[in-house]
Image: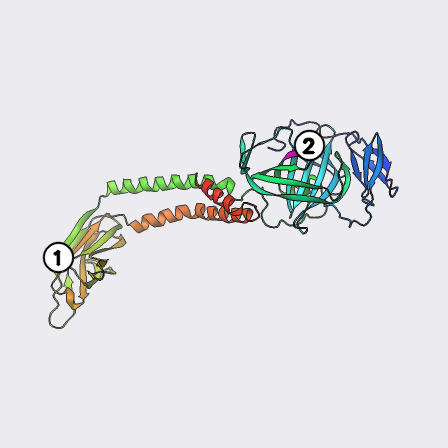
Amino acid sequence: MVGKFKKPFDPKFPQLLETISCISCSAPLSLSAVGHTVTVACPYCQSILDLKENKFSLVLHQTKTRKVTPLIPLGSRGKLHGVLWEVIGFMQRREAIDSKHVWDEYLLFNPKKGFRWLTQNQGHWSYVLSLHENPIKSKDNKYAKYLEEPFKFFHSGSSIVKYVIGEFYWRVKVGDEVRYSDYINPPETLTLEENDKESIWSLAEYIEPSTIESAFNLETRLPFMKGVAQNQPSPSSHVSWYLWWLAGFFISLFILLTLFLSSQSPSKIIYEDTIFFNPQGESSSLEIVSKPFEISQKMGALKFSLESTQLANAWTEIEADLINTKSGETRSFVDGIEYYSGYDDGYWAEGSQFDSVYLSSIPQGEYILDMKVIGDPAAKGIPLKISVEEGVQPLTNLCLALFLILLIPLLIFLRGLFFERKRWKESSAEQEGFLEFISDSWD
């Protein structure tokens, strides 16, 4: 939203400068925002000069302040959102409770558009606009709304001015402290800054460091980004919904195709028989060769099923060769069943009296089954029902197809989940905010 509602104009503006001398060190100071500047922080001695009754007076002399070199020098000009801006002020702030957490703020000026800000925090940049209309906050302060867009509470705290140079349109000095609350809706952040005298809302839009480098024609590279910024767009946000839609489309197409192929080649049983597990003598195995049967479908899938409703506390297994009677081509497979039950503080059961095996890409032709049946002694004499069915659609094929279709969207979703976890780890509402993100992802 930042800069989105502004009409374009001629970005060239005249060099309206006024030169004054620093009251503390006598260094020449050029003012760009004539008529707007209220405070000037001397870049040479860091003294603070305030404008009162059209005259600047020395407010604070602080020669002991450690000098900070801005990444974008004062006086630099760059075009952002179609507008040519000049950097006229630089400020460095720190967290009140964590002096090591510091960030930079650059005041931008254009005589026709007024003021904007650039902020830099851990290598992440935002373009900031002060708001004239206050957003609406929820009673529990967990949400804020601006231009009908919802923002979630992210963080609150207090910041202290650590370093300041250049021109500013309000009175500012090192040591000034404000309370702030951040609400996010990436790539934007709503921020409320307040002290005992006033409160100000601003809207920040995330901007890539490369855009800053290009806009201001910087000769040195900007610092690398660290971590995830609170308003940094997720790398998967712009493709996630499209990929899920595409995955849904291909899943529907695959199901329709499967149903169509099933209707064109319906499944049917081409061989079935019941055999009794009666090995001769002391042998624990039984060898059987089936009658020939015909497979009519070209390169179809077969389902071999084994069932025995009388199997109890025993197991049995069939080692089989599916043999083409003309070519001799053989496909070997094994299928088995086991079922146990009893009473031990109640009835229990495990295993199954039914099982099946799928064989894929079987050419049409005449086949026989050469089978070896084995089992434990408790399975002797029980009937085993075997059947061969052609034209089946193996469930494993469907599951594999669904997995491959969903793999990329799922990986992107997990990447986004990891990204958001890193973002909300820096929040005052880490756990609650991250769980709400997960909930919103499935809405």
Q: Which residue is mark 1?
A: 274
Residue 146 lies in what quarter of the image? top right
Q: Find residue 83 and name its label.
A: 2
Q: Nearer the viewer, residue 195 or 49?
A: 195
What is the x, y in percent for residue 80? 67, 35
Mark closer to the observer (1, 2): 2
Vertical placement of 15 versus 120: above or below?
above
Hey, which residue is sitting farthest right in the picture? 26
Vertical placement of 320 versus 192: above or below?
below
Q: Which type of secondary structure does the marked residue at label 2 adopt?
A: strand
Which segment did they paint magenta? Answer: 196-202
The amino acid type, in three-letter code, at marker 2 is Val
Residue 306 visible = yes
- Badge 1 local density, few (<14 within 10 Å), some, or many (20+)? few
Image quadrant in which the N terminus is located: top right
Residue 234 painted magenta? no
| Left or right for 87, reference 258 | right
Image quadrant in which the C terminus is located: top left
Residue 313 lies in what quarter of the image? bottom left
Residue 209 visible = no
Q: Find residue 319 and name its label.
A: none
Could you tell which of marks 1 and 2 lies nearer the N-terminus? 2
Q: Nearer the viewer, residue 253 or 82?
A: 82
| Left or right for 6, reference 344 | right
What is the x, y in percent for residue 218? 72, 44
The amino acid type, in three-letter code, at marker 1 is Thr
Q: CA distance from mark 1 to mark 2?
A: 86 Å
| Left or right for 43, reference 379 | right
Q: Nearer the viewer, residue 252 or 150?
A: 150
What is the x, y in percent for residue 43? 80, 43
Q: Residue drawn at (38%, 49%), measured in percent from left and top? A: 403
Q: Nearer the viewer, residue 248 or 43?
A: 43
